[in-house]
Image (cartoon, rainbow, N blue to C red):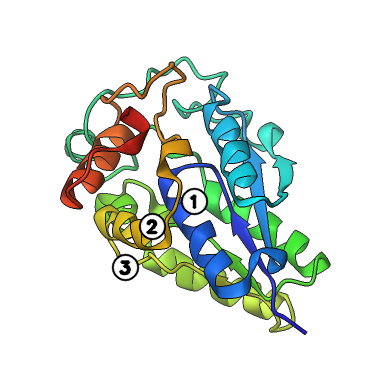
Amino acid sequence: MSEKAMVLFSGGVDSTTCLGLALERFGRENVIPLSIVYGQKHAKEVEAAKRVLEYYGIEGKELDLTPIFAYSDCSLLSHSREEIPEESYASQLAERNGAPVTTYVPFRNGLFLASAASMALSLGCSYIYYGAHHDDAAGNAYPDCSEAFYQSMNSAVYEGSGRVLGIEAPFITWNKAQVVKEGLRLGVPYELTWSCYEGGELPCGKCGTCIDRQKAFEANGIKDPALN
């Protein structure tokens, strides 16, 4: 029987590249994308995720975890009064004395992976893929993207599933430019993806994720397809 994989899928660069990698390894019929709503300020990434799934001709699962984050004042969340910072992650971290950036949603990836584990087991999957990479973990910006976090969660899920389910984070030691390079090899439809923390017609170009995304494409010698 063929192995199956569940992919945490937001419609951004990293998760779409992760999806492309899983599709290459397991085949379209053995990949289950999981998109999670968590109370974010706009629906642009959800719309992007649907466009990407249409491109690949596959159906995904959806899960709403919004109530769990009701007590957080993270600037990404719709009920927050905090403004999304318009500067690079490096600049933000320099002002925060080692604390995560304000766009860090409390233990989001931990919750996502635990929820995915339960669903993945029920659906007969052997793996959960998620697109964390080194740049997001650097400087403690997003601690739930670190290699230590990944290894700990993988161990917990593997043991807690009766040693039948594991987590794959193929980009955990890579920077975003390397992720984009891999996506270009895979033919990932980056023009359909959305990364910006703002919900405008076009990416703002000023938030941390926009800045990182643009630099990653420039490092590969191309303009970000989302800006064309």
Q: Residue at x 30, y 28 (%)?
A: 207
Residue hosting label 1: 16
Q: Are marks 1 and 2 in contact (CB under 8 Å)?
A: yes
Give residue 2's position: percent from left, percent from top.
72, 81
Depth order, front residue of 82/59: 59
> Quick check: 215 left or right of 172?
left
Q: Secondary structure at mark 3?
A: loop
Depth order, front residue of 109/170: 170
Give residue 5's position: percent from left, percent from top.
65, 68
Give residue 141's position: percent from left, percent from top.
32, 46
Q: Is residue 50 above or below residue 108?
A: above
Density class for disc 2 (Cα within 10 Å; few <14, some 14-19, many ≥20) is many
Q: Residue at x 73, y 64 (%)?
A: 120
Q: Is residue 103 above or below residue 176?
A: above
Q: Are marks 1 and 3 in contact (CB under 8 Å)?
A: no
> Quick check: 100 left or right of 104?
left
Cα–Cα span, label 1 and label 3: 17 Å
Residue hosting label 3: 173
Give residue 75's position: percent from left, percent from top.
44, 25
Density class for disc 3 (Cα within 10 Å; few <14, some 14-19, many ≥20) is some
Residue 193 visible in the displayed image: no
Tell me the quadrant of the picture where the C terminus can be found. top left
- Give amino acid for label 2: Gly
Residue hosting label 2: 183
Q: Secondary structure at mark 2?
A: helix
Q: Is residue 181 above or below residue 1?
A: above
Cα–Cα span, label 1 and label 2: 8 Å
Q: Residue at x 59, y 37 (%)?
A: 51
- Give amino acid for label 1: Thr
Extreme residue toward the right, this view: 122
- Give amino acid for label 3: Thr
